[in-house]
Amino acid sequence: MAVSTEDLIERFQRGQPLAFEALYDRYKDYIYRIAFFLTRNSGDAEEVVQDTFMDLLRALPNYRIGGPARFETYLYRFTVNRCRAHLRRRPPPSADWDEVVDRLEQLPSSRTEDDPENSFLGREQASLLWQAVDRLPEHLRIVIVLRYQSDLSYDEVARVLEVPVGTVKSRLHQAHQNLRIWLKRQEAVETAGAIAGV
């Protein structure tokens, strides 16, 4: 039976450094995923993971289990802050989205696909969707990543970003509108291309 995150934190706070290694192993892929989608660069994402866990190492002795925020929310806040600091230092490069899909496939997945054709179509649609997300301004892209990629609630996203819940909902609405418009344009372009090719 797996040791709970809370138990690992308590063990670390009692002076067991191996508990921190277990936390790192448990959360590094999730943090990498968020960092990669926000920085759009694998090297930067790896650096953000290391910096995030260094921040956590310093802060964890004072973390209150049972406090107002889940541990994941607490950890994502560190990640988002590190990503923002990284993005301020230099403009983010444009990602090669084939590389994004390949990297996402390497990360642990909560479900398995038995049908290879549906799996391929799902990856194609996901790739197109994340290309659209990549075009969003940072303040909209980050709420999409936290809400849908990290599966955080509105309240948790608000805590991570340190903004009111209403702001999160407003940004999500704006992001949805922008994504819908971009995806409709892409469909129109594909339809026109298919008609011209007939």
Image: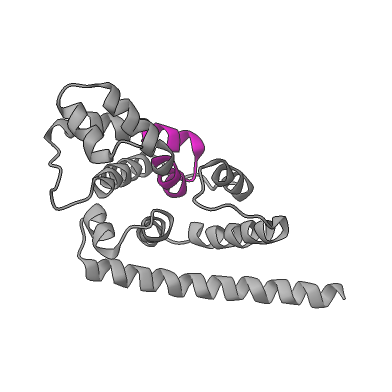
The number of numbered badges drawn on the structure is 0
Q: Tell me the residue at 71%/71% (across/down).
A: 190
Picture quadrant where residue 6 is located: top left
From this view, report whether residue 170 is shown above or below residue 100: below
Q: How is the image coloured?
A: one colour
Picture quadrant where residue 60 is located: top left
**Place of residue 55 in the rendered image (x, y in percent of width and height, measured from the top left):** 24, 33
Tell me, yes or no, whether the highlighted magenta stretch contains residue 52.
no
Q: Quadrant of the C terminus?
A: bottom right
Tell me, yes or no, whether the highlighted magenta stretch contains residue 46.
yes
From this view, report whether residue 141 is shown above or below residue 187: above
From this view, report whether residue 36 is shown above or below residue 166: above
From this view, report whether residue 142 is shown above or below residue 191: above
**Is 68 left, or right, of 114 in this rendering?**
left
Q: Tell me the residue at 46%/44% (across/down).
A: 36
**Place of residue 67 in the rendered image (x, y in percent of width and height, measured from the top left):** 13, 48
**Place of residue 97 in the rendered image (x, y in percent of width and height, measured from the top left):** 60, 50
**Is 42 left, or right, of 195 in this rendering?**
left
Q: Tell me the residue at 68%/56% (across/down).
A: 120
Q: Residue lying furthest right in this view? A: 198
Picture quadrant where residue 177 is located: bottom left
The magenta span reads: 31-49
In this orientation, which residue lies closer to the viewer: 120 or 92?
A: 120
Dominant SS in magenta: helix
Q: Tell me the residue at 49%/46% (across/down).
A: 40
